Image (tube, grey):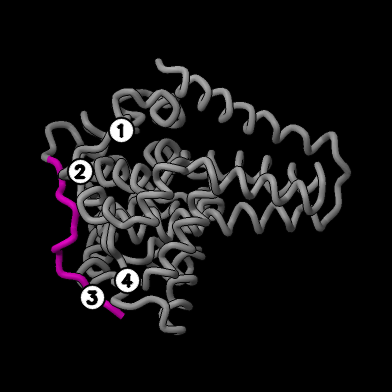
Amino acid sequence: MSIKKYLAIIVFWTVQVSALLVFAVPFHLAYLALWAVSHFLRAIGLTLSFHRYFAHRSFQMNRPTRFIWALIGTAAMQKGPLWWAGHHVNHHRFADREGDPHSPMVSGVYYAHIGWFLNDAKYDRLEKSNPVIRDFSKVPEIAWLDRNYVVPPLVLAAGLYLLGGLPWLVWGFCLPTMTLAHATFAINTVNHLFGSRRFETLDESRNNVLTAIFAAGEGWHNNHHRYQRAARNGFYWWEFDPTWYTIRTMAALGLAWDVQRVPTRIYEEARAIKALRPRHKIPSIIDAIPRAMEFSEDAESV
């Protein structure tokens, strides 16, 4: 392992442990609000830009708006947009089978949760044919963010410290960076182990309300694995999905368009499975063929 990777691991765990400093600084309700803004704003940056835009093309947005959201997502300290989205594409391509970069069924819970992210020798580079690399690696500002992913979180941490000293740094960066990291990583582990399965996908994806809350709507993971192209992961109004609310607001303001919604046939499938569930057996992922990304599947836009 290179010195650069050792340094990255040290920095990652230093930030994780630094969250304990919340017990060493004063507590105010305003600091709790600071944590919430930092956690959820960057969570939406990740889910809206890295996930639903770069990986799944579930809507379109103009170049300045795209850069702003990608910048916010990169500030989450989860590497760059191309690396993140490109690996997510491979997750869907090989979901819970050999080739999935983070499946608890294939590589165990620790590796699926954190190990693959830190010790990424196997997944250090993405193939040039990866659709994210193919389509976005030549966009200068996005490629810059991907190469210099340490800059946005560093600027955020420094800015918070200059504005409010150690309490702002701890409550606005250290704690929310830790909680957001595990909220994101939990989609790879918790959502493939615990929760409900509305759809009979060829993987172990599950819906989980707790991860949906802390990962800004990403916890409706079984929904998402059934129809990846949709701009919403919470397919029903009662499924909390703040990333979807943000996309709808952007569409109303003219900042997003070609927003892909869940086709009627998917809702009909959900109703049919619910009616037949007592007699139905959920298929095994063993010997299942890889599902292709649904870029070309018929989608309905709003």
Which one is earlier in the sequence, the residue at label 4 or at label 3? 4
Residue 222 spot, x, y in % from top left: 33, 51
- Element marked by disc 3: strand
Quadrant of the rendered structure where residue 252 is? Answer: bottom left
Q: CA distance from mark 4 to mark 3?
A: 14 Å
Which one is earlier in the sequence, the residue at label 4 or at label 2? 4
Residue 291 located within the stretch drawn in magenta: yes
| Drawn side of residue 128 relative to residue 125, left or right | left
Q: CA distance from mark 4 to mark 2?
A: 22 Å
Q: Between residues 157 and 275, which one lies in front from this camera angle?
A: 157
Q: Amino acid at mark 2?
A: Arg
The image shows residue 214, relative to residue 297, as above or below, that is above
Q: Between residues 186 and 80, which one lies in front from this camera angle?
A: 80
Question: What is the crowding at mark 2: few (fewer than 14 residues within 10 Å), some, or many (at least 20)?
Answer: some
Q: Amino acid at mark 3?
A: Glu
- Element marked by disc 1: loop
Residue on which disc 1 sits = 101
Residue 51 spot, x, y in % from top left: 37, 54
- Element marked by disc 2: helix
Residue on which disc 3 sits = 300
Residue 90 located within the stretch drawn in magenta: no
Q: Between residues 87 and 103, which one lies in front from this camera angle?
A: 87
Q: Residue at x 37, y 26 (%)?
A: 120
Q: Residue at x 49, y 56 (%)?
A: 71
Question: What is the crowding at mark 4: few (fewer than 14 residues within 10 Å), some, or many (at least 20)?
Answer: some
The image shows residue 302, relative to residue 93, as above or below, that is below
The image shows residue 298, relative to residue 184, as above or below, that is below
Q: Residue at x 28, y 33 (%)?
A: 125
- Report the predominant secondary structure element of the magenta stretch: loop
State the mark number for residue 93.
2
Which one is earlier in the sequence, the residue at label 4 or at label 1? 4
